[in-house]
Image (cartoon, rainbow, N blue to C red):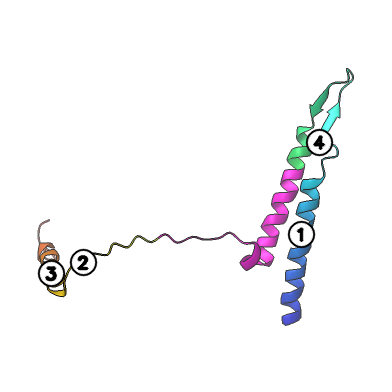
Amino acid sequence: MQQYARAREVQAEILAEEIIEIADDSSGDVIVDEDGHEQTNHERVARSRLRVDARKWYASKLAPKRYGDRIQHEQKITITDLTDEELDKRLMELTNAQPEPGGEA
């Protein structure tokens, strides 16, 4: 099983290297028309982008810890300087403010 996991890691690393090669290869991105004007070859650029995106996606599936999307968890914590007695009082106020089950809101 370790060999399989390592093979997947190596495959993801190869895909990462291919991504860099594709991104660095600008040959064919610009074409010269009959009048000698340079124009962007949008088809070539779009195809390169697709090739990069496909490899990024596959690498994220092969090695999600290394190449997968990072999930950020946002937490908001408010700390107050209330005493235990003040906290108990506030909890009682909040609890008593809740409507009884089956009662009108």
- First reached walking from the N terminus: tag 4 or tag 3: 4
Q: In which quarter of the image is residue 96?
A: bottom left
Q: Could you tell me which residue is drawn at 74 percent across and 59 percent down?
A: 16
Q: Which amino acid lies under the numbered mark 4 shown in the image of this protein?
A: Asp
Q: Where's the C terminus, which quadrant?
A: bottom left
Q: Reply yes or no: does residue 56 show up in magenta.
A: yes
Would you place residue 49 above or below residue 56 in this image? above
Q: Which amino acid lies under the numbered mark 3 shown in the image of this protein?
A: Glu
Residues at marks 4 and 3, CA–CA distance in whole angstroms: 69 Å
Q: Could you tell me which residue is drawn at 83 percent across and 25 percent down?
A: 38
Instruction: Check contact, mark 4 vs mark 2: CB within 8 A.
Output: no
Which is nearer the eye, 76 or 33?
76
- First reached walking from the N terminus: tag 2 or tag 3: 2
Magenta portion: prevailing SS class: helix
Q: How crowded is mark 2: few (under 14 residues within 10 Å), some or many (20 or more)?
A: few
- First reached walking from the N terminus: tag 3 or tag 1: 1
- Image coordinates of residue 83 in percent, x first then y, are 16, 71
Q: Could you tell me which residue is drawn at 28 percent across and 62 percent down?
A: 78
Q: What element carries label 3?
A: helix
Q: How crowded is mark 4: few (under 14 residues within 10 Å), some or many (20 or more)?
A: some
Q: Where's the N terminus, which quadrant?
A: bottom right
Magenta stretch in the rendered image = 48-74
